[in-house]
Amino acid sequence: MTSWPKAVLFDFDGTLIDSALDIHAATNMLLARDGLGPVSLDDVKAMIGEGTRKLVDRAFAAAGRPLNEAELDDKYGQMVPLYAANLTKLTQLMPGTADALAALHQQGIAMALVTNKPDFAIAEILGHFDLTRYFPVIVGGDSGVPHKPAPDMLFLALSKLGVEAADAVFVGDSPADARSAHAAGMKLVLIEGGYSREPLESLGADVVLHDMSELNAALTRLAPQG
Ligand SMILES: O=C(O)COP(=O)(O)O
Ligand SMILES: [Mg+2]
């Protein structure tokens, strides 16, 4: 049979990048403007996964000041420049990421980034880590389709790549990733060390990996037999 998979779709925060420290710093600067005390790094990790607007909503609720929609618009508008000023100050690649992506690229496997992260943050972070060339297709949080856990972002990426769901794998770190992959009918790899609020073993992955260095071998094992 021809090589499998034809494409691998990747989540971003908690899967390819460990961005929580920069998001944490920006979140606490935003809260401090309202005289609210800081939230912990672990709390912020539990707030990442459904986009930065949702994170702002969760952070104010956790700090004891729930926001209405108009207030959330305002606070999110303030969060964007705070985070944009320090997208890569403390952010690191997750272990094994650079080598895993280089190996897939060398095998001619198409790749796409499918992230709830807003678009303003994506290109700069990819460029900083020299990953831009691997992702001809990026579906970000401002793409205009429903966010993960809905399958729409995955379908959009697949259609841009011209690959069927059955020929592709989604690699992520969170319940939203797991649910979107299941809804899209894609094989699912989950990577430990990200920002999941639920145990990865409970999320129905085809395989759970310790880190990205195990990805290429795992993809070979996931290939359909026959
Ligand atoms: O920005 C977020 O909350 C999550 O982004 P992700 O979809 O890349 O994990
Ligand atoms: Mg993630």
Image (spheres, rainbow, N blue to C red):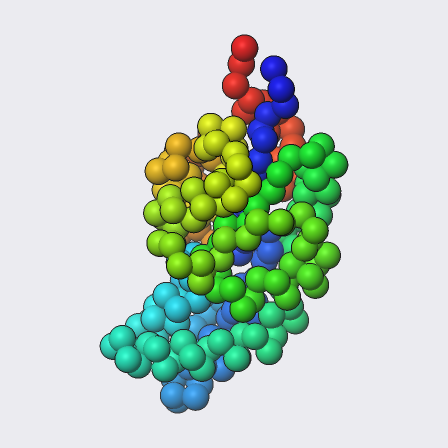
Residue furthest left as drawn: 68
Q: Is residue 170 above or below residue 195?
A: above
Is residue 147 found left or right of 106 in the rendered image? left
Is residue 108 found left or right of 179 in the rendered image? right
Q: Is residue 127 above or below residue 226?
A: below
Q: Is residue 106 above or below residue 63?
A: above
The residue sitting at 73% across, 42% down in the picture is 102
The residue sitting at 53% across, 37% down in the picture is 162
Q: Position of residue 190 (x, y in %)?
A: 50, 40
Is residue 145 found left or right of 119 in the rendered image? left
The residue sitting at 65% across, 28% down in the picture is 217
Q: Position of residue 151 (x, y in %)?
A: 38, 44
Q: Position of residue 131 (x, y in %)?
A: 69, 53
Q: How many marks overall?
A: 0
Would residue 66 be seen by someone viewing this image from the given angle? no
Quadrant where the N terminus is found in the figure: top right
Q: Position of residue 54 (x, y in %)?
A: 37, 65
Quadrant where the C terminus is found in the figure: top right
Q: Is residue 183 above or below residue 74?
A: above
Residue furthest top as drawn: 226
Would residue 70 be seen by someone viewing this image from the given angle? yes
Residue 221 found in image quarter: top right
The residue sitting at 48% across, 31% down in the picture is 164
